[in-house]
Image (cartoon, grey):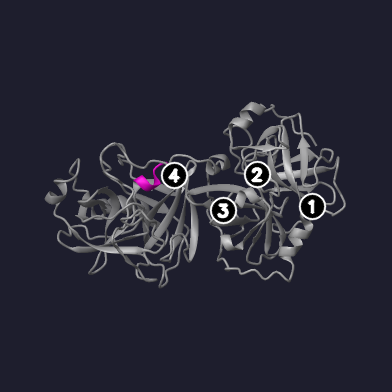
Amino acid sequence: MQVLLVFLSVAFALSLGAKLPLDGTQNFNIHQRIFGGKDAHKGQFPYIVSMHIRRANESYICGGSIIDHTWILTAAHCIHNADWVKIFYGSTTLWNSELSHVVYSDNIIEHENYDNGTHVNDIALIRTPRVEYSELINKVSLADRGNDYEGAWAVASGWGEIAHNSISKSLQFVGLQIDRKSSNTIIRSTTWDGTSCGRGDSGGPLVTQDDPKLIGITSTGIGGYLTNFCRVSAYLDWIRSHTGLEYKARVREPKTYNSLTMQVLLVVLSVTCALSHGAKLPLGGTQNFDIQQRIQKGKDAHKGQFPYIVSLAISKKNRITECGGSIIDNNWILTAAHCTHNADWVEIFYGSTKYEQGEFSHVVGSDNIIEHENYDMATTHVNDIALIRTPRVEYSELVNKVSLADRDNDYVGAWAIASGWGKNEYGRKQENLQFIDLQIHSKMNCWNYIYKPSDTIICVGPFVGEGDSGGPLVTRDDPKLVGVTSFLDPGRLSGFSRVSSYLDWIRKHTGLQ
């Protein structure tokens, strides 16, 4: 089939992403999008999955194909050096799936001869918990060994960008004809009508239109003109060697999570930016306070000690920032406004002392974030408080709420506990939840240190540190959430948003008394 669309220039496509040499002559953009595609209906492609991939402080998306109850086939460049992958099954809407699994790096098998420079052998497997097939979730058969599929029509599908700065939240598909065979390991489709795969579709399937078979994995190309796919038939022995019954690799079983019941609207992260090197997204304003906080000289918390704390992975454009938050109700998290300011989405990890390894997690879009309407990020960080609406969570020994501060208590002189996963005094990331006892200063002592005195700020000493922003300050005796970690004056004190100053604001948005 042919889908008519304005032709996207090769020069523009090449300007968008990392470049790689192929066949020694041309440069191709490896981060793909469906250009000139159509919306898929629910259940039309039950074999495709979308994947949220985390590597270091970067986050990006790719596609993949279900080839068995416990196996996903995708591109090696998608999962190269990945820490973990969240797989979304059975939906045409990005991140709003019937089922999702989180899978860690020890369940990822990258082709042993994959070359990250030339992207030869751009194929990988992901082992998952068992999924049961249905109308919306099903496997696709693999390509026939002796068929090169020259001239055949096939369907490519994915959730990537559909044009320049135009993001598809709905699954797109496009019909492509296979070129004459020019490589034993690559299938190529060249078009002149503006149809192709593109950035965000990497790792996704190319499936024959008649007698559906998975013949290709989206790899490299030029948006609107040409797409290269990894030829599946060239890797049948490799696939079977890893997915057969004799496979005995060590596997840490990932947890299974039910998907959100509310629709999560997300801005798609550009794979190009995620894979490229870039400056970290600054969170600070113009004054001399470091608002990316750390628990320094803290102690390791034991499991269940602070069931109200959550860790947050926050996406802002193409960067991931890390913050903490507090459970204040079954459906609400309290955190700092500077953490969620301009966020595209937030993943919330509940019930663990290990960073981003919760008992379960929720992904929440920007339409579920409520930032204080008078938050001033540029100057004072006054009103540095925000709410996140979540799907309902049930309480347990590991997941529970914390009571809010009393309205008329300033807590001067009281001892309180700050907790979080931020870096230590040596700049090393804390994988285990840390906590520290701190004494609350008088307002006058606090005002001597901060740029603009405010009754809405609590000061403690010595200080917390980077990565703990948004986390809780809870009184040691009769635990109450009295502060939300906001800023740091290095070597002297830490500033927290005073929760008691915002009880009416919290009640207005949550209905909590």
Can you tell which quarter of the image residue 348 is in? bottom left
Residue at the far right in the pictured view: 146
Q: Is residue 102 visible?
A: no
Q: Which mark is residue 81?
A: 3
Q: Determine whether label 1 and label 3 are within 8 Å by CB.
A: no
Q: Is residue 331 visible?
A: yes
Q: CA distance from mark 2 to mark 4?
A: 23 Å
- Foreground disc of the pair 1, 4: 1
Q: Is residue 378 above or below residue 494?
A: above
Q: Nearer the viewer, residue 204 or 14?
A: 14
Name the main secondary structure of what is drawn in magenta. helix
Residue at the far bottom in the pictured view: 397
Mark 1 / mark 4, whichever is N-terminal: 1
Q: Secondary structure at mark 2?
A: loop
Q: CA distance from mark 4 to mark 3?
A: 25 Å
Q: Secondary structure at mark 3?
A: loop
Amino acid at pointer 1? Ala
Amino acid at pointer 2? Asp
Residue 239 falls left or right of residue 263: right
- Foreground disc of the pair 3, 2: 3
Q: Which mark is residue 343?
A: 4
Q: Write the start and end of the magenta stretch as one range.
A: 338-342
Q: Which mark is residue 201?
A: 2
Q: CA distance from mark 3 to mark 2?
A: 19 Å
At horizontal 46% and vertical 61% (from top left) the residue drawn is 392
Mark 1 lies on residue: 234
Q: Where is residue 218 shown, x and y percent of the image? A: 70, 45
Q: CA distance from mark 1 to mark 2?
A: 21 Å
Can you tell which quarter of the image residue 351 is in? bottom left
